[in-house]
Structure formats: structure tokens, C-alpha cells
């Protein structure tokens, strides 16, 4: 855990330095699917640290593995031993636009199960962390999900994949269905931080289709350790190979799913 925190904080320092120079933005699959030289540097830095200190651990990371056609299915079969799942910058579009809402997300897995989660926003210096059965923290303070008892008190968030940024997307229709039921819906643009915000009570719930393991591996542990619930659309415990994620303070979970599905 302390090593993971050290790597992530150092990567945060690197990002803060590198963002002072031109970002060299490149398109990946389309105009909303972007990567910068800073994402690449952050990822290489993290991979190098882990390879040096833990040469027998596996690593899955967005900019190295994300181009693979089967990247969604990569964790269908649980991978044995210890592994690291890395998003070098979650919220790249926010980062490019100098919106201070992006994070480095690092999850550590053991025999197919999430064990440790670290999500770090280097601009605000907020570090969310959790270890299975060890509680969840924002910097040194324990965090817990919000106490909202009813969907009508809920502040929710959602998001969409770059490829789903088009008219008539399911998510647009789902947001419409929330109108008049939840208090409001936000699209904040960094899924790892959305999960942490549910964990610390700022949001009551979050849903998203088509996320990848690196978007959620760390946030899952943090939210569960903070007393939250994370499932797929059928209400079954969320697996990293699931396509839909529904997260909440647990109390409103059933109501949230019943409106979404
Ligand atoms: C994206 C963010 C965003 C979510 C997208 C992700 P990236 O990750 O988490 O909130 O809606 O689906 O792809 O590309 O900025 O690492
Ligand atoms: Ca991306
Ligand atoms: Ca991401
Ligand atoms: Ca990313």
C-alpha cells in the first residue's frame, strides 16, 4: 500500500511539471478519444516503478493495453497472483482543458480480486485510498458514503465512452428518466473520482456503461470500503469484465437500478 501511494504521488508530481509545457494532444479512435504525452509519461513512469520493485507482478494499463480489441474481455478469466491496473490520467479531456478534475488511478489485484485502490488528484492533492477490510480514507481521514435515504434526495453522476458521444445514446434517455426522481445528475468526466465521490458522500450514486478495468479497479475498493455498493445492471456484484456499473451509498441502490433498467 505504501509503495503504491509513493508511486502515485510521484506520478502526480511528474504530471504537474509536464503540464507546464505543450501537451501534444493526439486522437486515438475519434475526436473525443484523446491522449497526451503526459498520459504516456505518467503510464511509463508507473510501469517502470512497478517492474523494478515487483518484477513478478502483471500490469494492465490504458495506453499500453487499451488498443487491444479484446481489452474489455481481458479480465474475463481472473488473473492469478498480484497485478496492477493503471489509468495514468483518468479524465484526460478535463486535463487537456485545465479543469482540475482528473486523477491517477491504481488498483492492485490479488488472484482476480481487487485488494488495494489509490486515486490521486495531483492538483487538489487529494488522495483516496483503501485496502480490502481496512477502511477507506481521503488523505488521512476515514470516509463514508452519504446518508441519503431516498432517491429523491440523491445527487447522481454518470458519463459515457467517447464512442457513445452521439444523439440518442442510452445515457441521454437514462438521464431523462432521472428527471423529477433524483435531485440532479452530473457528468464530471473522471469515473475513478466519481466512485470516490460516492465513497465520501459528495455523490449518492453513479452509473456508467462501457467502462474499462483501469477506470474502476481502484475506485471499486474505495467505495466498498466506505460502505457503498457496486453492481452490474442486474444487481449482481460488479466484475471488472461487466459492461454496466451501478454504484451507490447502498440505501438507494435498488431504486437506482429500477429507474435505469
Ligand atoms: C474516461 C473518464 C470519463 C468516462 C469515460 C472514460 P479517460 O477516462 O473516466 O469519466 O466517462 O468513459 O473513458 O479516457 O479520461 O481515462
Ligand atoms: Ca482515455
Ligand atoms: Ca479512464
Ligand atoms: Ca486515461
Image (spheres, grey):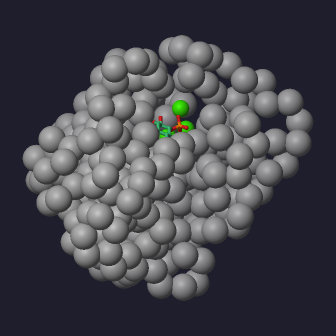
Residue 72, image x and y in percent?
A: 30, 30
> Is the residue 49 above or below the residue 201 in the image?
above
> Is the residue 9 above or below the residue 67 in the image?
below
Q: Is residue 18 left or right of residue 243?
A: right
Q: Specify the farthest residue to the front.
A: 180
Q: Is residue 41 left or right of residue 148?
A: right
On the rendered image, what quadrant is the C terminus found in? top left
Image-quadrant location for residue 4: bottom right
Residue 154, image x and y in percent?
A: 35, 64
> Is the residue 66 above or below the residue 223 in the image?
above
The answer to whether one can see residue 21 in this image is: yes
Image-quadrant location for residue 244: top left
Residue 2, image x and y in percent?
A: 56, 73
> Which residue: 30% across, 32% down?
173
> Which residue: 71% across, 64% down?
124
Q: Is residue 109 left or right of residue 232?
A: right
> Is the residue 135 above or below the residue 43 in the image?
below
The answer to whether one can see residue 229 in this image is: no
> Which residue: 49% across, 35% down?
62
> Which residue: 34% across, 68% down?
153
Quick one: 122 or 166, which is closer to the camera?
A: 166
Amino acid at each position: 500500500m505504501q509503495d503504491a501511494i509513493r508511486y502515485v504521488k510521484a506520478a502526480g508530481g511528474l504530471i504537474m511539471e509536464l503540464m507546464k509545457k505543450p501537451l501534444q494532444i493526439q486522437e486515438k479512435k475519434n475526436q473525443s478519444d484523446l491522449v497526451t504525452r503526459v498520459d504516456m509519461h505518467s503510464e511509463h513512469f508507473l510501469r517502470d516503478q512497478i517492474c523494478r520493485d515487483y518484477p513478478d507482478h502483471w500490469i494492465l494499463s490504458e495506453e499500453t493495453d487499451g488498443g487491444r480489441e479484446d481489452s474489455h474481455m481481458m479480465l474475463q478469466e481472473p488473473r492469478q497472483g498480484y497485478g496492477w491496473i493503471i489509468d495514468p490520467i483518468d479524465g484526460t479531456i478535463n486535463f487537456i482543458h485545465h479543469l482540475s478534475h482528473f486523477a491517477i488511478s491504481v488498483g492492485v489485484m490479488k488472484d482476480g480480486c481487487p485488494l488495494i485502490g489509490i486515486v490521486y488528484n495531483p492538483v487538489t492533492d487529494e488522495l483516496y485510498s483503501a485496502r480490502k477490510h481496512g477502511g477507506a480514507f481521503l488523505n488521512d481521514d476515514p470516509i463514508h458514503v452519504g446518508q441519503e435515504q431516498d432517491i429523491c434526495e440523491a445527487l447522481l453522476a454518470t458519463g459515457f465512452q467517447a464512442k457513445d458521444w452521439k444523439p440518442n445514446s442510452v445515457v441521454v434517455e437514462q438521464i431523462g428518466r432521472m428527471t423529477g426522481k433524483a435531485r440532479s445528475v452530473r457528468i464530471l468526466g473522471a469515473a475513478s473520482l466519481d466512485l470516490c465521490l460516492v465513497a465520501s458522500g459528495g455523490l449518492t450514486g453513479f452509473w456508467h456503461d462501457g467502462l474499462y478495468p483501469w477506470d474502476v479497479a481502484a475506485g471499486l475498493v474505495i467505495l466498498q470500503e466506505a460502505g457503498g455498493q457496486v453492481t452490474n445492471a442486474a444487481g449482481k456484484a460488479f466484475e471488472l469484465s461487466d459492461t454496466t456499473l451501478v454504484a451507490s451509498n447502498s440505501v438507494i441502490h435498488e431504486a437506482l437500478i429500477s429507474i435505469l433498467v
